[in-house]
Amino acid sequence: MHSHLDHVDEPPDFIEKIANHAGVILLGSVALIFLVWIIYFSNFGALPTGETVLSDNTQIWGQFGDFVGGTLNSIFAFFSFMILIASLRLQVKELRLTRRELALTRAELASSSSTQKQQIDHLRTEAEKKDLLHAIDYILTRDIIGKDNFVIGVGTGANAAVTRNLMEMNFPTKMDVDRSSPGTYDTTCFFKEVHAIRKLDADCAALQGLLTDSPILKCAKERYGEISRCLSAKGWADGFQYLNR
């Protein structure tokens, strides 16, 4: 994974640099100590006594220690403070880079999650499209809905001597059938056909939203459009979503 922070200069590893130059730093510290001694000797004599022999006076040695310690302590304290500041700056830089990396990681995870969701939605849509195509194709190839089946018999059983055909428009309206007394019309098979064409119309309407201008949709509309218009005219369908357009 390539980070967007590749162009950002990484902060130097300050501790590693110190470790790599430990020898030089040690020699420099020793040289600094000798330098302080040389300054002292050049100004106050070769030895703490100002003479050629070592003094047994603790006060004189105290003055010498105060000079050397005060000088070196100030210098080493200054360098320690500078190292501390540099370390803090290094930690701040590393913390800033870590935060940026975390922000980029969150963004990449969100992008990955969005991509996965889109893939899932696409697969779900394709599965739904496949199911609808299968259902519509099944009705078309098996010719489940036929014009000859949209007939209502007047009377039931042996008394159904007269049939009325939807396509001849001598068909009773839904209101006529609803208001008739029981047994006046034989509508059992007819209702099955109406249910089938309503299901077909709903599937076609759903598929149109997923697959515009599909040949199978045009075929269904051409084959069953006239039936749906006749059903709507007689009140048997409250306006189809697709077939009656």
Image: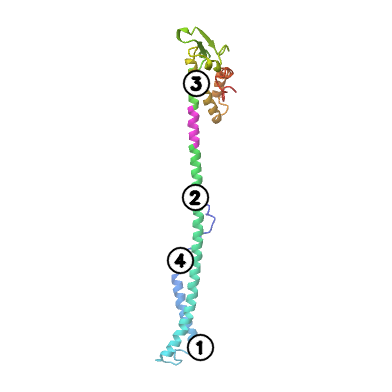
Q: Which label sits on residue 43?
A: 1
Please report whichever mark, 1 or 3, sits nearer to the chain's N-terminal start: 1
**Magenta span:** 121-131
Closest to the camera, between mark 1 and mark 2, is 2
Disc 4 from disc 3: Cα separation? 81 Å
Our reading of the magenta stretch's main secondary structure is helix
Which of the two discs, 4 and 1, sits closer to the camera?
4
Residue named by callout 3: 195
Nearest to the eye among marks 1 and 3: give it: 3
Under mark 1, the amino acid is Asn
Q: CA distance from mark 1 to mark 2?
A: 66 Å
Q: Determine which residue is flagged by label 4.
A: 15
Mark 1 or 2, nearer chain start: 1
Residue neighbourhood size for the residue with mark 3, other residues' Cα within 10 Å, grouped as few (<14), some (14–19), many (≥20) = few
- Disc on res. 106: 2
Q: Is residue 123 magenta?
A: yes
Q: Amino acid at mark 2?
A: Arg
Which residue is more in the foreground, 192 or 202?
192
- Residue type at mark 3 is His
* Above-or-below relation of 128 to 63: above
Residue 71's spot in the image, x, y percent?
48, 81
Q: CA distance from mark 4 to mark 2?
A: 31 Å
Label 1 – label 3 distance at C-alpha: 118 Å
- Inter-mark Cα distance, 4 to 1: 38 Å
